[in-house]
Amino acid sequence: MNIEIVSCVPYNDQKPGTSGLRKSVKQFQKPDYLQTFVQAIFNTLPEREGSTLILGGDGRYFNREAIQVILRMAAANGIGKILVGKGGILSTPAASHLIRKHQALGGIILSASHNPGGPDGDFGIKFNTSNGGPAPESFTEAIYENSKTLEEYRITPIKPVPLDKVGVYDLYSMHIEVVDSVADYMALMEEIFDFDKISQLLRSEHFSMRFDAMHAVTGPYAHTILEERLGAPQGTVMHGLPLANFGGGHPDPNQAHAKELMALLYSPKNIAFGAASDGDGDRNMILGNHFFVTPSDSLAILAANAHLVPGYQQGIAGIARSMPTSQAPDRVAARLGIPAFETPTGWKFFGNLLDAGRITLCGEESFGTSSNHIREKDGLWAVLFWLNLLAVKQESVASIVRQHWAEYGRNYYSRHDYEAIPTASANTLMEHLRQQFDKLPGQMLHGKQVKAADDFMYVDPVDGSTSAQQGIRILFTDDSRLIFRLSGTGTQGATLRVYLEQYESDPAKHDQDPQLALADLINIANDLAKIPEFTGRINADVIT
Ligand code: G16
């Protein structure tokens, strides 16, 4: 085999964040930037010789070029077989499934998730291990350490591999299969959900829905599954054509960025169900007619009703949520008599619990929900889960959620984001909060008494590994919580996230505007963190 050993100068900024390495496209286009990181991944995989890898991405700008580079480097690094999604496309959940199905050593997923794309947007790359989940911190740290001293990479000089049709190719000793991006994933969904019932619902003239693929990776999946296989009318899928720049939009399924979908669901058109997914298809937003379901409530409701879905009929072993996610799922776990776990933000922290069989469902406030069927969050899975529930219960989304609140109480919840603030100011704000830890407990603030104030630290119950400083928590005696965290996925400056949660047991008080119900906590957050002073912002940039 003709292998080129190319000398390179190491970069010192290739530290993966919450979910892989995310940088601007321009950064990735710097000489050998992509190659250095990919070689660092291969160097961190001593057992790579002859192994199988999965490769694909969300179709964003630079996806195709990156795939060709990675194929050439994989061949030069002794990989035995690579399965690539057709057109270079694989949603993150579909990639996770393929890794597990083919017992691959892992997968390289090219995505910056919900971050904007295009030549002036972001690009990203992450490695998922053989369980199908994001590599743990020990692994991403090892990649980073390697990247800092890397002085050469290996590559083969071959012609581009045709990616646009299913086929097989041999590159020296490496076998490449270009596979249908959707087929295996759809088969998995069919094992979990009652497709006949969902199909009846979608074909009924009394029901209509819209799914917003946001010009990102779920377009082909949603067209095939919802429209072709399940019979939803054409036009159900909006923005279904994946575009390299996501049509200029921000592929983040929330109220702020899925504006057209929101407008439709809040219009007189009487659309019963709305959903959206993000750049790489792992996030989801769920809407009813004139109704928004918070991701935390969604997890709680799916857990409470899981027995109605064929794949979870036998019951669920446990539930996990990230720390900033509301405590609504914990109430369901308590009622079901199953354990509830609280992990740091980042899907990688669910992996051990899922592998050990200690949880079945998990989710995060950042619009992510999933189960033990894969090791990633899964946007379309959540949509199909809701459709399955709607088909069984024959009730509206709003009535399902209201009944849930009546039974368990409502956890009013909101997240306020202050984006692209200077990193130094963000760090000072966090430090300012830490300095108050000792004197806060017992204090009365806007009528609420502080129970505890700390930095969240996680000890993994399976392998005992610890992760410190995973968000600042101000906990109150009435179970409300105020959490401050700096985002690990942004690429410009720092993003401050303020998470607000207030519990209300009285059904007569379940119809308030969340921002009003949370007004005291919002005031406390401003007082304690001096947000305008440190960030220069009076209002949050994005409120979800
Ligand atoms: C990623 C992780 C999620 C996490 C989210 C939070 O999501 O996969 O587990 O909740 O980041 O991001 P931040 O650190 O900005 O709060 P995704 O969809 O971007 O891969």
Image (cartoon, rainbow, N blue to C red):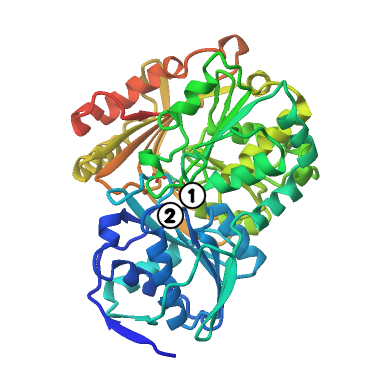
Q: Which residue occupies the foreground of this view, 152 or 232?
A: 232
**Residue at the spot 75% in from the left edge and 26% down from the top edge:** 204
Residue at 78% in and 32% down: 200
Pointers 1 and 2 in contact (C-beta within 8 Å)? yes
| Residue type beneath disc 1 | Asp
The first of marks 1 and 2 along the sequence is 2
Q: Secondary structure at mark 1?
A: loop
Horizontal and vertical percent position of residue 37: 35, 68
User: CB at mark 2 closer than 8 A to ligand 1?
Assistant: yes
Q: Which residue is mark 2?
A: 111
Q: Looking at the rendering, in which quadrant would you find the N terminus? A: bottom left
Establish if 448 lies above or below 380: above
Tell me the crowding category of disc 2: few under 14, some 14 to 19, or many 20 or more residues within 10 angstroms, Cα based. many
The x and y percentages for residue 100 are 63, 64
Within 8 Å: ligand 1 and the Cβ of disc 1?
Answer: yes
Q: CA gap, disc 1 to disc 2?
A: 6 Å
Residue linked to disc 1: 280
110 or 318: nearer the eye? 110
Q: Nearer the viewer, residue 259 or 446?
A: 259
